[in-house]
Image (spheres, helix red, strand yellow):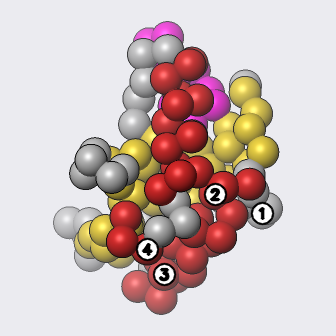
C-alpha cells in the first residue's frame, strides 16, 4: 500500500491510500497545503488501526462505504463505494492493517 499526495485543480492537496493493485481505498479531505496533507496521513497512520474510528455508511445509491475519523470525530478520509458490505469490511481491514506502514509518495 502507499499514500499518494496530489495537487487539486485549485492548487490545494489531497491524498489517496492505494492498495497494491493501485485501487484507491481511502481518499482524504482537501488540504490547503502539502504539509497539511502530510499531517492528515499521520492521522490516518495513528487512527487507522483502530476499528472504533471507522463508521459504516450507505450512499444514496445504496452502495456501502466507510469513513475514517480522528479521535476528535473529524473525518480524515472516505472510502470508495463498494458492491457489498462484505467488500467494504475487507477495505476497512486493509486500512487497519496497512495504514501505519504504507509508503508516502507525491505527484
Image coords of residue 16 (percent x, y) = 59, 44
Q: How far apart are the two marked residues, 4 and 1, measured between alpha carbons? A: 23 Å
Q: Is residue 55 above or below residue 84?
A: above
In this view, the mark in front (1 or 3): 3
Image coords of residue 43 (percent x, y) = 49, 44
Q: Is residue 106 left or right of residue 27?
A: right
- The numbered disc on residue 89 is 3
Tell me if mark 1 has few (under 14), some (14-19) or many (20+) residues whose alpha carbon lies within 10 angstroms of its own: few
Q: Is residue 45 above or below residue 66?
A: above
- The numbered disc on residue 107 is none
Check disc 4 and report the residue beneath it: 51
Secondary structure beneath dot 3 equals helix
Query: Which mark is first along the chain, 3 or 2?
Result: 3
In this view, the mark in front (2 or 3): 2
Q: How far apart are the two marked residues, 1 and 3, measured between alpha carbons? A: 17 Å
The magenta-colored residue range is: 5-15
In this view, the mark in front (4 or 3): 4
In this view, the mark in front (2 or 1): 2
Query: Which mark is first along the chain, 1 or 4?
Result: 1
- Residues at marks 4 and 3 touching, judged by CB atoms closer than 8 Å: no
Amino acid at each position: 500500500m502507499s499514500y499518494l499526495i496530489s495537487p487539486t485543480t485549485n492548487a490545494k492537496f489531497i491524498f489517496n491510500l492505494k492498495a497494491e493493485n493501485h485501487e484507491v481505498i481511502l481518499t482524504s479531505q482537501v488540504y490547503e497545503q502539502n504539509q497539511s496533507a502530510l499531517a492528515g496521513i499521520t492521522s490516518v497512520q495513528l487512527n487507522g488501526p483502530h476499528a472504533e474510528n471507522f463508521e459504516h455508511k450507505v450512499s444514496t445509491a445504496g452502495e456501502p462505504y466507510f469513513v475514517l475519523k480522528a479521535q476528535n470525530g473529524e473525518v480524515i478520509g472516505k472510502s470508495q463505494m463498494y458492491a457489498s458490505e462484505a467488500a467494504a469490511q475487507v477495505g476497512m481491514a486493509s486500512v487497519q492493517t496497512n495504514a501505519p506502514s504504507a509508503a508516502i509518495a507525491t505527484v
